[in-house]
Amino acid sequence: MNTNTLERAAVPSLAAGLLLAAFAAPAAAQAPSDSTATRVGNAVTITVRGETPNPVKMRVDSSGSLIIEDSAGITAGPGCTRSGTGNTAVNCGPASTVTRLSVALAGKA
């Protein structure tokens, strides 16, 4: 095999590898945090994702709001808001009006 043949084979492979890396990077950068909490009406749904076990805690704060905490990170979906600093707790409104609580567990994201 001569040098021209190697160059013709290597250039498309290198270009394909760079193109794949360019498309893979944004997806990894936008990976969701481990858990998400949403509230629609009186129903609160918590979706827990992640490969390692981590405690997800629910509590009622002094104002009567349902606070959901995940030490690995939690996203405030519709009906919930970020609570405190960081990304480990969300406030899903008055606990007294929650009539349905759903928790979905997944082993891997």
Image (cartoon, rainbow, N blue to C red):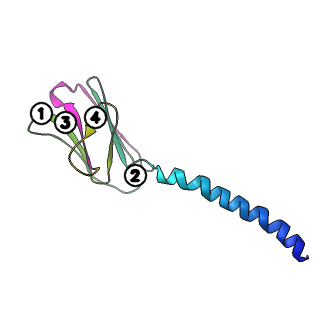
Query: Circle 2 — which element?
Result: loop
Give above or below for 78 relative to 88: above
Could you tell me residue 109's position as x and y percent? 45, 49
Count of residue discs: 4
Segment tinted magenta in the rendering = 88-109
Name the disc covering residue 80, or none.
Answer: 4
Q: Amino acid at mark 2?
A: Gly
Q: Amino acid at mark 4?
A: Cys
What residue is pinned by disc 2?
50
Query: Which residue type does callout 3 highlight?
Result: Leu
Q: Secondary structure at mark 1?
A: loop
Looking at the image, residue 52 lies above or below residue 105: below
Classify mark 3: residues with Cα within 10 Å, few (<14), some (14-19) or many (20+): many
- Distance of label 2 from label 1 (alpha carbons): 29 Å
The answer to whether mark 3 and mark 2 are in CB contact below 8 A is: no
Q: Position of residue 28 (x, y in %)?
A: 50, 54
Please state which amino acid type lies under the numbered disc 1. Answer: Gly
Marks 4 and 2: CB-CB under 8 Å?
no
Residue at 42%, 50% in the rendered image: 107
Residue at which label 3 appears: 66
- Spatial CA span between label 3 and label 1: 7 Å
> Height in image: 88 above or below 81?
below
Residue at image position (32%, 51%) is 73
Q: Quadrant of the N terminus?
A: bottom right
Residue placed under numbered mark 1 in the picture: 64
